[in-house]
Image (tube, coloured by chain):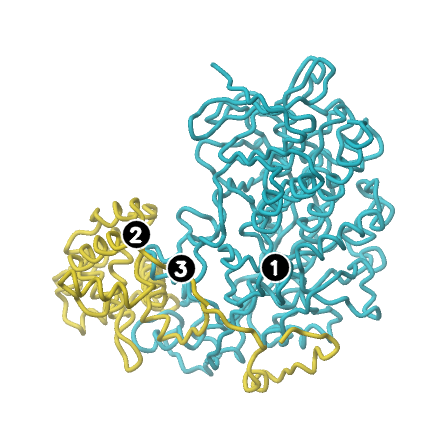
Amino acid sequence: MEHNSNKINRRDSLKWMGVASLAGITWACDTQETTETAQEEHQHATDDSLKLSEADQKLMNQQFFTDEEMKTIRVLSDIIIPADDRSGSATDAGVPEFIEFMMKDQPRHQTGMRGGLHWLNVQCNKQFGKPFPDCSEEEQTNMLDQIAYPEMARPEMSVGVNFFNNFRDFVATGFFTSKMGIEDLGYQGNRATVWQGSPQEVLDKLNVSYDMVKEYKFVN
Amino acid sequence: MQIKENGTEYDVCVVGSGAGGGMAAKVLTEAGAKVVMLEAGPTFNSAEGDMFKWPYQSPRRGASTHRPFGEFDAAYGGWEIDGEPYTTVSGTEFDWFRSRMLGGRTNHWGRISLRFGPKDFQRRSVDGLGDNWPITYEDIKPYYDKVDRLVGVFGVNFPKELGLDNEPDGIFLPPPKPRAYELMVKKACDPMGIPVLPSRLSILTQPHNGRAACHYCSQCNRGCSTYSNFSSPPVLITPAQNTGNLTLITNAMAREVLTNEEGLATGVSYVNKEDGLDYTVKAKVVVLAASSCETARLMLNSKSSRHPNGLGNSSGMVGKYLMDSTGASYAGLFPQLTDRFRYNEDGIGGMHMYVPWWIDNMKAKLDFPRGYHIEIYGGMGMPGYGFGGGIHRYNTWFKNGQTSNGGGGYGKQLKEDYRYYYGSMVGFSGRGEPVAREDNYCEIDPNQLDQWGIPVLRFHYKWSDYEVKQAKHMVDTFEEIIHEMGGKPLWQKPGADTDYGLLAPGRIIHEVGVARMGKDPKKAPVNEYCQSYDCKNLFVADGASFVTNADKNPTWTILALSMRTAEYIVDQRKKANI
């Protein structure tokens, strides 16, 4: 079955590619293509590239986080979802750019996110004498262990816990809605098919069977 | 301001293009009537919708920034629309969802297509509350049959021994097989006496009337590129257009129904949203199907010396007896559904199994009079915005004490957890019947206009104890099912302080009532054919005429009633009665 809903016009695509390479985003194409020809080939090869409306393009062109803040976001994102043998890391999947976009798309998140990053640096300064990105891996882990486990955290860390819960959620959505994340998860759908029921091994494992509904006539 | 008049006099002007307006237009044009249809939003073709779009094709990954059900949902509009406000009387609440587009809310709805049953039309006779409809199930059954045949709906007739005599048989396409987790629900519910049965949705499991069968992408709410589910434009409006008798005017926001000295409707005035100018169309008959509350708003805003309280409102009942379905939900995680074998579990865009209301409230001496049905959700769906949210609340569960630090965390173990819990949730939503009350109403707010200068609606709506107790029964039942299935509820069960999770009125988007049908013109604005008692060439064809809002989604009944009303209009025109 042919479906045309995912087509995007060439100009939009090139506009996006330009922004993407500036921002170091890798979610629209696997490798950083630099020539227009290569981009066009890529465009022809895929039908699921990013589509930006004019309004979204405007948001993309604005910058909310400072370079320093983005640095912290990158480090944090990859600590939360690192690369492993199945897939890449959060930054490989474009999570920091997704978070940046959402701040502009839903400005209600701005204060909490910026405040949380600030709080994290203040805490690290207090405990280790330097902001979070400059801390050693050991110091970063030490800091995060104080806020990453809500039930274990000390009461005075509650704002940090809330920030980290929120940040973790952003990273998870950003990663698992990326192409890499969806492949990692093993989601098999979003395609034309014929539903014929759940596989036998799935039914067996759950101790159910289609005999339970044998009085009804199903399609397929 | 100059008002532009269209010189043509149409046979019928239909306001609204959703289920009610679309059906009326189809029946009327096929009978040869010249029909003009006014739609307040732009045109829409679901073949050009966002079906098959991946979240990563949008920088917001499908977030609901601009649309309440997510970026890829088909509905243009929502509970708030810029420039088109409404108000609520303090201490009451009603959230009014509007979908300004060709086809209205049929473009994104859940396609749950349930006939009202015999008892639903005679509730007062059953429990002494509210009023009976002036019609019976037998009066409307032939129209349900025709709707089934025309539109297409899958399902099964339930075995008689189940005693579900308020769940009528239909003319069904075969349903899809249940998903594995839906069989888990059935297994748990069987010993509890809760019937889990194949659902009934207007999604084609076989080719039907020239439309292709479903391709099982599970994205019905985005609009279907092959028209394999029901929405008004391809199923009703295109056939109406093919007769050559339909004039469709989009971006036309109806302002009022025009009347003459005798008090009869002569047409409709509307504002063209593109040029901001006012226009009128003339018609011999006016059919309002603008969505129940918008229909009431039009009637109330159409005041004249002959109709000082608004058109068709000598009873004072226009706007009264507003109803939305009740709604409460609860969900759990299930250890047997962790670390799942991956396969394409999308299926149709909704549940394959559901639970119709299974208890006789009177016999069982329940402390609430009306029932609800249960919708089941879960599965390994396409990840979307919000995926993985709140994992710190549960990622210690079902791991045999292997996690020492409690929930939350980061790193490789956390990444593994997202995979582990994917598809392990199953949830339940109750959708129930409220008791109609005169003091749940909408009226014209004397102090506020929308951007087109049209007075807006003010709502006054409160749930009663009946609905609150029903919600308690819902969440208690869902909790039992979750435990019976061996799972763990995902959040604390809502208690009395939150009315047991009962959602605000309007949230289920089943607004009906406000111009109800009845035998007594003093108590009801329209008769059993949805014809105004005060203005015989004015009809309503959406949910406005409903006397009760059964524990079934209203669309199938809107379609059947609209068909019946349109056939009546054809008949009355032939007899020169209108």
Residue at the image position 22 percent from the left and 61 percent from the top: A73
- N-terminal label among 2 and 3: 3
For label 3, count other residues whose C-alpha is less than 10 Å away and answer few (under 14), some (14-19) or many (20+): some
Q: Quadrant of residue B372?
A: bottom right
Are the residues at dot 2 and dot 3 in contact (C-beta closer than 8 Å)?
no
- The picture places residue A192, in percent across and down from the top left corner, at 48, 69
Give the residue number, with chain letter if any, for mark 3.
A4
- Expressed as whole percent of the image width and height from the top left, the position of residue A129 reads 12, 62
Closer to viewer: mark 1 or mark 3: 1
Res B471 visible: no
Query: Which residue is identified by label 1?
Result: B210
For disc 1, the neighbor class at 10 Å (few under 14, some 14 to 19, many from 20) is: few
Amino acid at pointer 3: Asn
Name the chain letter of the residue that bears numbered label 1: B
Question: CB of mark 1 within 8 Å of CB of mark 3?
Answer: no
Q: Nearer the viewer, mark 1 or mark 2?
A: 1
Q: Nearer the viewer, mark 2 or mark 3?
A: 3
Give the colour chain A carries in the figure: yellow
Looking at the image, do the residues carrying marks 1 and 2 touch, with CB atoms under 8 Å apart?
A: no
- What is the x, y in percent for residue B354? 66, 65
Is A33 or A152 nearer to us in this picture? A33
Q: Residue furthest right?
A: B125
Across and down, in percent, residue B30 comes to 68, 42
* CA distance separating discs 1 and 2: 35 Å
Task: Out of B498 and A1, give the one closest to the viewer.
Answer: A1
- Numbered badge on residue A52: 2
Tell me the cyan chain: B
Q: What is the CA distance from the residue labelled 1 to the residue labelled 3?
A: 21 Å
Residue B114 vertical position relative to residue B353 in the rendered view, above or below: above
Type of amino acid under label 2: Leu
**Residue at disc 1, secondary structure:** loop
